[in-house]
Image (cartoon, grey):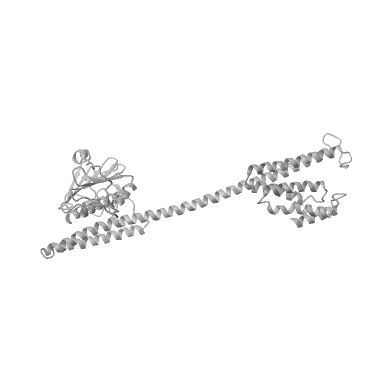
């Protein structure tokens, strides 16, 4: 810009812009003052604009032979105030002051020219729209467009920069939110995997431990009973491996079937479709087999269905099965050898309720690392329900899970294919009570007031 200004000054001097132009040293100083401050126009836009405006007026008054680079420098200075000044009020005031000062100076100069007969001798002053008046109007319009353009372009540049900044900020926020969402998804998956592993491993390992202990005790006195107990250990270990395999398959397969599960389906849980359509088919349909297994392993357990069974969402059905499984596992671990359990599944108009009670008499022991009830509460909360657990009024312990479920079609005859029936197992008592007899057939038990139950309670 400084080199261009020097070239412009030289050309205008040769062209004879002024009869008596400013001396060379003064023109040199003017060139430096009008161009060099532009290097700081982004950091100090308002002071730079004021300096250049004063230098511009000084160059005109001192007859510095230049009329191109000076105008460009002033335009850039005013534009920079609008585009880079963070103090918007100061930016507006400074630009308006510079514009008003320039226009006032222009009007005064035109007035002096119009009243001086010797000024601009080539322009006639005769008529309402004389050549001199036309020339003056052109000067005013040109300056209005000049300063207005500098003001508006600078303002638009500021607005565009703010919009870009806001967009970049929103993009960064969305990226951080995406990262947080991904981290939360990973954490939720870890919790879900831990919950499934706990439910599968704790249940089957407790069964194997009880049967292995029974086999050790009866090995010499009753070899047949010991062999039977070891057979249960073998079957239970295979079942545990099968469930783990299904769970891992579900985790790997993102397109697995997530449809509804029949109210009482096949012994494995009957997924509302052909067997094997989903890696895991556990659900409320597997509760009768779970109860039969519990009875076989030494914990007398009964099962009762209250109301008309109907199709449940797959997640709700699986969660209820896991709650029943964990509750019976806790009974075996903590309720004592003389305990018995009863499982009750109620189909209410707007919800489904699962109760697992026991007659255990062993005092509850606080566990420092119990995760079973935490997992049960998480499962119920995920479906919008609630869980109650604590000593019941007539002795023993009661776990009650209530999950809201929209009313659906009842299953034919109260069971699904391969569902629970009185013949499901010789040692399993299964009762299906009509919906209209819910209140009379299975009244809801109360839980006595007690501190928050821990995992170690039966």
Left or right, 111 with reference to 266: right
**In the rendered image, is residue 289 in sight?**
no
Left or right, 359 with reference to 3: left
Q: Residue at x 58, y 47 (%)?
A: 163
Vertical arrangement, residue 349 with respect to residue 422, above or below: above
Horizontal and vertical percent position of residue 40: 68, 53
- Front residue of 187/336: it is 336
- Front residue of 29/279: it is 29
**In the rendered image, is residue 53 in sight?**
yes
The quarter of the displayed image where residue 108 is located: top right
Horizontal and vertical percent position of residue 263: 26, 48
Quadrant in which the N terminus appears = bottom right
Horizontal and vertical percent position of residue 152: 67, 44
Left or right, 223 with reference to 354: left
Outermost residue toward the top in this view = 128
Horizontal and vertical percent position of residue 421: 19, 49
- Number of numbered discs: 0
Vertical arrangement, residue 131 with respect to residue 281, above or below: above
Q: Residue at x 39, y 55 (%)?
A: 187
Outermost residue toward the left in this view = 221
């Amino acid at each position: 810009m400084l080199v261009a200004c020097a070239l412009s000054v030289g050309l205008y001097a040769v062209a004879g812009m002024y009869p008596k132009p400013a001396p060379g040293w003064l023109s040199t100083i003017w060139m430096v003052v009008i161009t060099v401050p532009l290097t700081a126009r982004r950091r100090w836009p308002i002071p730079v604009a004021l300096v250049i405006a004063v230098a511009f007026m000084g160059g005109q008054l001192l007859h510095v032979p230049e009329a191109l680079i000076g105008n460009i420098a002033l335009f850039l200075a005013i534009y920079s105030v609008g585009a880079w000044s963070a103090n918007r009020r100061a930016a507006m005031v400074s630009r308006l002051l510079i514009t008003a000062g320039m226009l006032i100076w222009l009007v005064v100069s035109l007035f002096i020219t119009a009243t001086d007969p010797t000024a601009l001798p080539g322009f006639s002053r005769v008529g309402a729209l004389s050549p001199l008046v036309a020339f003056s109007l052109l000067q005013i319009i040109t300056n209005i467009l000049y300063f207005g353009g500098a003001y508006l372009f600078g303002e638009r540049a500021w607005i565009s920069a703010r919009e870009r900044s806001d967009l970049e900020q929103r993009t960064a926020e969305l990226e951080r939110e995406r990262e947080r969402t991904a981290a939360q998804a990973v954490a939720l998956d870890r919790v879900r995997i831990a919950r499934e592993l706990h439910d599968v491993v704790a249940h089957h390992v407790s069964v194997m431990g009880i049967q292995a202990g029974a086999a050790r005790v009866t090995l010499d006195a009753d070899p047949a009973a010991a062999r039977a107990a070891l057979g249960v250990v073998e079957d239970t270990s295979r079942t545990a491996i099968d469930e783990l395999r299904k769970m891992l398959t579900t985790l790997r397969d993102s397109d697995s079937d997530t449809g509804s599960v029949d109210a009482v389906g096949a012994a494995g849980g009957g997924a509302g479709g052909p067997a094997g359509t989903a890696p895991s088919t556990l659900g409320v349909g597997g509760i009768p087999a779970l109860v039969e297994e519990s009875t076989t392993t030494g914990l007398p357990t009964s099962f009762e269905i209250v109301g008309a069974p109907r199709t449940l969402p797959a997640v709700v059905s699986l969660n209820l099965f896991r709650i029943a499984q964990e509750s019976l596992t806790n009974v075996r671990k903590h309720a004592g050898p003389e305990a018995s359990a009863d499982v009750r599944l109620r189909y209410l108009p707007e919800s489904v309720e699962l109760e697992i009670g026991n007659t255990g008499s062993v005092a509850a022991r606080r566990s420092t690392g119990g995760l079973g009830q935490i997992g049960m509460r998480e499962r119920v909360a995920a479906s919008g329900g609630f869980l109650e657990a604590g000593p019941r009024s007539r002795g023993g312990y009661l776990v009650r899970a209530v999950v809201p479920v929209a009313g659906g079609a009842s299953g034919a005859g109260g069971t699904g294919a391969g569902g629970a029936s009185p013949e499901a197992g010789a040692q399993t008592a299964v009762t299906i009570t009509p919906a209209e007899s819910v209140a009379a057939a299975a009244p809801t038990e109360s839980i006595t007031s007690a501190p928050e139950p821990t995992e170690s309670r039966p």
